[in-house]
Amino acid sequence: MLVDIDQFYRQLRAVHANDYHLCFYCGCIACQKDYAPPRDHLHSYLSRSLSADFLIVPACKECSVFLKGSQLPLVEQRRQLVQNKLKQKYKQAIHVYLSWSEDEVSEMEGNLLLSISAGVKLGEESFIRSSYIGYDFELDGQRNSKSHFVSPVVSVFGQQFNDLKTAITACSQRYDIYAAQLSEDLAKHDNNLEAVILDIQDQQQQKAYRRELNSQCLRFAKQHKLSRMQVVNAVERYIDKNADLTIPQALQQYYEQRVQYY
Ligand SMILES: [Zn+2]
């Protein structure tokens, strides 16, 4: 006997007309159904009473492809998977979108304008899809509120921004860091812009310190006919032992304890 497997699922339906036919995962036009958990794994979830949503969810074609083969039983897990795949697939375009401000794009001409605008547009679309949080829906006659997307507020050192792009543009100017670099490093820091800025500032300070170290040691080396590396190594040893020492103080100690006796 054929059992209609769909009877074990409930259909998730949008409450508002604007959301009818939209993919619940990314907000594109839905033309397919996604099953959470997938129908081929329904039995194992039912027989072992494992926690699962047992929902039929409107999904677009691309999300369905992303979800193919996934056994995840909860809608929110499936959304997470889709969003990670969107971020991965459109990484380059999202990077372009986050890196270029409207002002910069408007100053371009010709082919460059065309290609950057296309990248920005695709990036914006992908960025929005990859942070979509669904819509208000109805289940068994009950309404469930899912505050309609978008922009979770981004907070950077206490200042709030409506979205990540605005935050990147503002922080790029304030901290004098390229927007492209801020965007590029986001993945490394779990999308935490504050952590990205701190890390870049730390690297900048280290670079500045190396430059200063090299230049002071070179001057000292020339003066005392030593090799620069020899002086750098010595200074680093002194500073390793006592982190409070400045470079000139370390050089002074090096001079007093060693160089003057050479
Ligand atoms: Zn979708």
Image (cartoon, rainbow, N blue to C red):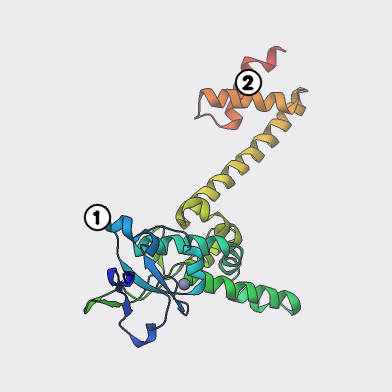
Choose between 12 and 237: the one closer to the eye. Answer: 12
The residue mark sitting in front, 1 or 2, is 1
Q: Quadrant of residue 262?
A: top right
In the rendered structure, the answer to whether residue 88 lies left or right of residue 118 reads left
Is any atom of residue 171 visible in this view? no
**At x 59% / y 57%, what residue is drawn?**
181
Secondary structure at numbered mark 1: loop
Mark 1 crowd level (few <14, some 14–19, many ≥20, 10 Å Cα): few
Labelled pair 1, 2 in contact (Cβ < 8 Å): no
Quickly name the residue at label 2.
254
**Amino acid type of disc 2?**
Tyr
Residue 225 on image: x %, y %: 78, 23
**At x 28% / y 72%, what residue is drawn?**
7
Residue 9 on image: x %, y %: 30, 70
Quadrant position of the N terminus in the picture:
bottom left
Residue closest to the far bottom: 17
Residue 172 on image: x %, y %: 55, 62
**Amino acid type of disc 1?**
Ser
Residue 85 drawn above or below residue 232? below
Mark 2 crowd level (few <14, some 14–19, many ≥20, 10 Å Cα): some
Compare marks 1 and 2 and give the one earlier in the sequence: 1
In the rendered structure, the answer to whether residue 67 lies left or right of residue 107 reads left
Q: Quadrant of residue 152?
A: bottom left
Residue closest to the far front: 1
Secondary structure at numbered mark 2: helix
**At x 46% / y 53%, what residue is drawn?**
190
Residue closest to the far top: 261
In the rendered structure, the answer to whether residue 147 lies left or right of residue 142 reads right
Q: CA distance from mark 1 to mark 2?
A: 72 Å
Quickly name the residue at label 1.
49
